[in-house]
Image (cartoon, helix red, strand yellow):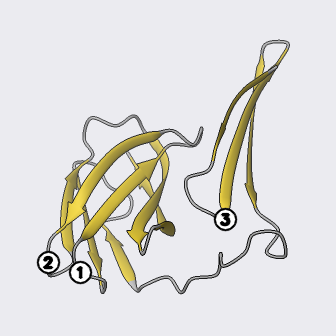
């Protein structure tokens, strides 16, 4: 049974489905020939410390913008704002242990800028 579909940006998606008592999570990248104007250069971005326990610091060359963290199911679990100088510190201490995708709003797209492990 299909339980959800999510497109955090124009290139990446998630599908979650149940079969019997097993949850399947599929992460995919769209065919570039089908998605028009999907290619955008990802701005240089740093995520540290990685793995993170309490705080995650993000620095990017784009300046002010919105940061999104997504869990393995493709659900947004946190957002934050980069300051005008391109820095943000997020309190991740309340997040469950795991791997999270970090995406950055850039010209109307959510660009994947990395993954962070939360311990």
Image x and y of residue 5, in percent: 68, 38
Picture mark count:
3
Percent of width and height locating residue 119: 37, 45
Q: Find the distance from the CA under tag 2 to the CA under tag 3.
A: 27 Å
Taking the spot 66% from the left edge, 65% from the top edge, the residue there is 11
Relative horizontal placement of residue 45, taking residue 29 as reference (left or right):
left
| Label located before the other in sequence (1 or 3) | 3
Q: Which residue sits at x=18%, y=61%? A: 89
> Which residue has dot 3 on it?
11
Q: How much space separates mark 1 and mark 2, taking CA atoms?
A: 5 Å
* Mark 3 closeness class: few <14, some 14–19, many ≥20 residues within 10 Å: some
In the depicted view, which residue is nearer to us: 109 or 111?
109
For disc 2, the marked residue is 84
> The residue tagged with tag 1: helix, strand or loop?
loop
Asked if marks 1 and 2 touch (Cβ < 8 Å), the reply is yes
Judge whether 11 appears above or below 59 on screen. Answer: above
Point 66% across, 59% down: residue? 12
- Distance from the alpha carbon under mark 1 to that under mark 3: 23 Å
* Residue 97 percent across, percent down from the top left: 43, 39
* Residue beneath disc 1: 63
């Amino acid at each position: 049974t299909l339980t959800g579909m999510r497109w955090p940006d124009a290139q990446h998606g998630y599908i979650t489905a149940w079969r019997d008592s097993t949850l399947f999570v599929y992460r995919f990248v769209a065919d570039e020939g089908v998605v028009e104007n999907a290619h955008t250069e990802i701005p240089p971005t740093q995520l540290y410390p990685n793995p993170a326990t309490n705080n995650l610091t993000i620095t990017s060359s784009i300046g002010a913008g919105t940061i999104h963290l997504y869990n393995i199911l493709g659900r947004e679990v946190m957002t934050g704002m980069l300051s005008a100088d391109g820095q943000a510190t997020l309190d991740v201490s309340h997040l469950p242990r795991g791997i999270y995708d970090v995406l950055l709003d850039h010209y109307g797209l959510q660009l994947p800028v990395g993954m962070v492990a939360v311990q």
